[in-house]
Image: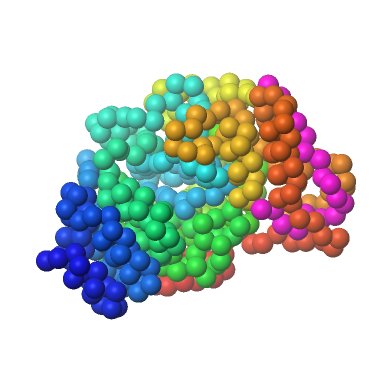
């Protein structure tokens, strides 16, 4: 078997076999197949695509390229959740304890933020003492004991994905749905969950800007899960504006805690309940989404989910008192107002611009080596549909000092807002659901 023959076959539109894809990925990881040949193959896939079976076989080849987590010692059906990334997305901090409080074990591996999107691991590390690295035995024991553990991804999980993603990034082949889908799902499958619920973002703050492309990606990922025997469902949610109001690590932890107190933003609460409902159904604890929703609302508003959060934080070395006293979280010494430059109704917010604004304050990473300031960030005061007068506050910046770069961030936040003279209704938050039965729009 030769790489050039595999490239030729895909270039001409042929479907690659499991053995051909395994040969390609294994050879690339071992250094037997050079970058230029994988680049040619990736470009062929970009233009020719892959069918569901091919994409599933590629996904498994990447999952098998490194460590795979065996979660079989954990009792029950393990359900994982993954978001394709967004601004202000702190759902895992809420969904983990919420779903675990319903008796569904959540054994989750999460990543760090890069660029305008935040990472769950960074947010959890905003809580002093919180350990995001556990041994395999500690991880499994904790899930069996309290029903929940969230840790950073293993250094040797899906090394093929890391190599291939770096190559795609410099060969203009990132925007290939089969390659995106296999990248996401290889990590989820290697992490060992029995079932997977996906939150696929769409809109200005998401990687996929249109609903049609987001549904194609969701469909590809659900097909992969089905092909490899993992129950999988995907919700498409709007990211034309940030989720909730807070953008920045400690600020988002505080908003997640508010939500677990039953006092969170409506959009954040709605999305968490919707994703959690699918997890509880796939986890076998409810026979329908309506039954799951009722169960989850009971756990949320009775305080059971908040208590689970406290137990979870304590188990991983953090101070559970933070759940009742958010002032224990890192605090920025200065809060600056961002004034509106116009009168009117907020018609649109460029979510990506606000994510970049928070990153420039120090809340995110421009490169993997960047050091995060957990205290800084942006808290919105106006969202789509809200009326504002010139000079009123659009957002609050939590900063270390007031300097020229912060003034640049203020201008960036102002430019992210678009106004209308007429009342505006925000876009629906939940747009469609994708299962193995197909796509259903709400």
Q: Which residues are magenta?
A: 333-350
> In this rendering, would 203 be left or right of 339?
left
In the rendering, at what x and y percent does residue 410 appear? 73, 39
Q: Is residue 421 above or below residue 64?
A: below
Residue 71 in the image, given as x and y percentages of width and height: 25, 43
Tell me: 374 left or right of 219.
Answer: right
- Residue 279 colored magenta? no
Residue 433 position within the rendered picture, expressed as x and y whole percent measured from the top left: 49, 65
Residue at the image position 41 percent from the left and 53 percent from the top: 169
Q: Is residue 347 magenta?
A: yes
The C terminus lies in quadrant: bottom right
Q: Nearer the viewer, residue 49 or 153?
A: 49
When asked about the image quadrant of residue 33, the answer is: bottom left
Residue plotted at (16% across, 60% down):
23
Is 56 located above or below residue 379 in the figure?
Answer: below
Is 143 on the left or on the right of 397, as rendered?
left
Q: Is residue 148 visible?
A: no
- Residue 370, visible in the rendered structure: yes
Total numbered labels placed on residues in the image: 0
Image quadrant where residue 336 sits: top right
Q: Residue furthest left?
A: 1
Look at the picture and state if 20 lies above or below 110.
Answer: below
Residue placed at 34% from the left, 30% from the top?
A: 133
Q: Main secondary structure of the magenta part?
A: strand
């Amino acid at each position: 078997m030769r790489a050039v023959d595999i490239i030729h076959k895909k270039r001409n539109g042929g479907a690659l076999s499991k053995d051909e894809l395994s040969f390609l990925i294994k050879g690339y990881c071992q250094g037997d197949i050079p970058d230029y040949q994988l680049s040619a193959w990736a470009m062929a896939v970009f233009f020719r695509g892959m069918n569901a079976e091919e994409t599933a076989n590629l996904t498994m080849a990447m999952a098998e390229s490194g460590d795979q987590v065996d979660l079989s010692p954990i009792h029950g059906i393990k359900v994982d959740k993954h978001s394709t990334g967004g601004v202000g997305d702190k759902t895992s901090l809420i969904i983990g304890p919420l779903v675990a409080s319903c008796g569904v074990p959540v054994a989750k591996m999460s990543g760090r933020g890069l660029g305008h999107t935040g990472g769950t691991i960074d947010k959890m590390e905003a809580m002093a003492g919180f350990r995001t690295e556990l041994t395999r035995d500690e991880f499994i024991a904790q899930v069996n004991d309290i029903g929940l553990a969230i840790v950073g991804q293993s250094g040797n999980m899906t090394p093929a994905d890391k190599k291939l993603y770096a190559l795609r990034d410099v060969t203009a082949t990132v925007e290939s749905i089969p390659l995106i889908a296999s990248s996401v799902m290889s990590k989820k499958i290697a992490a060992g969950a029995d079932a997977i619920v996906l939150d696929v973002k769409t809109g200005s703050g998401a990687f996929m800007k249109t609903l049609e492309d987001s549904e194609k990606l969701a469909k590809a990922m659900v097909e992969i899960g089905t092909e490899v025997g993992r129950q999988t469902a995907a919700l498409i949610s709007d990211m034309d504006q940030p989720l909730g109001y807070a953008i920045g690590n400690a600020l988002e932890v505080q908003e997640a805690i508010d939500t677990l107190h039953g006092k969170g933003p409506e959009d954040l609460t709605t999305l968490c309940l919707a994703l959690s409902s699918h997890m509880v159904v796939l986890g076998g604890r409810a026979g329908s989404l309506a039954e799951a929703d009722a169960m989850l609302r009971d756990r949320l508003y009775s305080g059971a989910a908040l208590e689970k959060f406290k137990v979870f934080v304590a188990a991983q070395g953090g101070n559970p008192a933070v759940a009742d006293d958010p002032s224990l979280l890192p605090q920025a010494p200065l809060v600056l107002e961002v004034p509106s430059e116009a009168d009117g109704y907020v018609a649109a917010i460029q979510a990506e611009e606000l994510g970049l604004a928070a990153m420039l304050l120090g809340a995110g990473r421009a490169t993997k080596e960047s050091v995060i300031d957990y205290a800084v960030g942006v808290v919105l005061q106006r969202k789509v549909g809200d009326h504002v007068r010139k000079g009123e506050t659009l957002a609050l910046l939590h900063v270390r000092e007031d300097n020229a770069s912060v003034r640049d961030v203020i201008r960036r936040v102002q430019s992210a807002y678009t106004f209308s003279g007429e009342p505006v209704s925000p876009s629906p938050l939940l747009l469609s659901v994708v299962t193995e039965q197909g796509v259903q729009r709400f």
